[in-house]
Amino acid sequence: MSRFFEKRWCNVTRCPPGYFKDEGIDKILVPRMKKMPVKMFRSIRHTKDFDMSLNYDKAYELPPGIPSHKFAEYSVSGLTDASEKYAHRNLSAPIKANLHFSLSRSGIIALDRAEAVIEITEWVEVPKKILTPESNITNQNSSSKVGVANSTTDIKENLSSGSDNNSSTPINGSNVQEIITEKVLKKRTFRVPLKVVEKTTGGGTILSKELYSEAKNRLEALDKKDAERRKTAELKNNLESYVYSMKEKLEESTDILTVSTEQERESFAEKLSKVQDWLYMDGEDAQANEFKERLGQLKAIGEPILFRLSELKARPAACENARLYLDELQKIVNKWETNKQWLPKKRVDEVVSQAEKVKAWLEEKENLQKNTPVYSSPVFTSEQVYEKVLDLQDKVSSVNRIPKPKPKAEKKIAEEEPASKGKTTSSESAPNEGEYTETSQEPKAREGDHSASANSSDLDPESHDEL
């Protein structure tokens, strides 16, 4: 919905006497050029359920094709029950219904919620004061002499009246607390949520299953036509751009003269001109298949010429890179022989053999290409050269990753044999010393223990190391 149209809300229910002079109200809800998004509410004095609608202000300003200026209708219920519930209370104001609207950033307006507002006045008992003897003492100290006299007399009167009214309540010294109430006229407001049911009318009415399926099929057919139209336009643009680019190359590029014959160029230029004429005459209403077929016919002649033109520079560059790598590979093999002697000779020989094959193949193909005219199909391509080099690089990498083998453990075994013999002799002598210390006297035994521990500490590291 455009923001340039004013929107009105209209209550079309007959209102009770005393509230409205006419049967309904009709007010502008969203004025022209209203800032969006925004929330707003309107209040109406009402006691019964009602219906309301949202309309465009001026139907004659709407664009053609809109059947009605009414675009939404709502049914608000629950107001009758709320009015009957609070009718016996002392109403301080007429019952109202608050309608809350929202206008989205896209200009869509809707009734979000509704509520009934009931205001009543009632006499309510509220506590006047809370009096205790302790509070009386503090009041006496803080007030003036006259204030003290007045407060004491009031307290006595209140206490005496309280004792008469509540004679059954016992009074316990300083803990006595008496609540004195008084009646006050207070205003209370009740808000009751109302039920809102949307009844969309006009162009937004929900479609039936038959109309929905019919509209869906129509949209699918339109989408299919749009896809075909886009495909046809794309193929036509591709054909047109290919014709112009190839004609420009035939006329301006000097390299094409070397990779094509004069007869080939003349035949190709003639076909390009025919297709160009067809594009602006019979091809205006042609189908996508016709554009695709004619583009394929032109590419069958033009692509081989363009391929020979690209290989004219790409093939010599690929051959030069292959020779550089073969020279570098010879240096890599020499480093293997000096720094990586553990590499298997068989694997190294395989790398050298494959490198020689690649070198021989490259020399053979280059000699054949020299004897072949440039406007003919090439003997070999730059892609084939790169494939050969990549295969050779993979084999070199696999050999270069072979790890260095670990050293053998023969020397360690030879050192363990004499150490084990020394361990057996020390273990045999230890029990004899222990027996001797046990049979000797007490002081000597202690000295023997110290000497034995010293000797054992000298032998321990050796034995632990061997273990």
Image (cartoon, grey):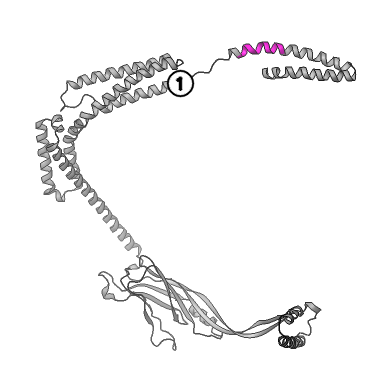
Choose top left, top right, bottom left or bottom right for residue 300: top left
Q: Quadrant of the rendered structure where residue 142 is?
A: bottom right
Q: Main secondary structure of the magenta part?
A: helix
The quarter in which the N terminus is drawn is bottom left
- SS of the residue under disc 1: loop
Please give the residue where the numbered disc 1 appears in the rendered image: 402
Q: Which residues are magenta?
A: 412-422
Q: Which residue type does callout 1 highlight? A: Ile
Residue 386: in magenta span: no
Query: Residue 50 placed where, x, y %?
Result: 43, 79
Please provide percent x and percent y for residue 365. 23, 20
Residue closest to the far right: 441
Of residue 190 and residue 440, the one placed in the foreground of this image is 440
Q: Is residue 335 left or right of residue 157?
A: left
- Write the residue at 32% across / 76% down: 57
Left or right, residue 331 beside residue 444:
left
Instruction: Using the rendered image of the protein, determine whether residue 361 is visible from the camera's viewpoint.
Output: yes
Q: Position of residue 186 (x, y in %)?
A: 58, 83
Residue at x 25% of width, y 18% of height:
363
* Quarter holding residue 200: bottom left
- Graded by Cα atoms within 10 Å as few (under 14), some (14 to 19) or many (20 or more), the crowding at tag 1 reads few
The answer to whether any part of residue 381 appears in the image is: no
Residue 413 colored in magenta in the image: yes
Q: Residue at x 77, y 12 (%)?
A: 428
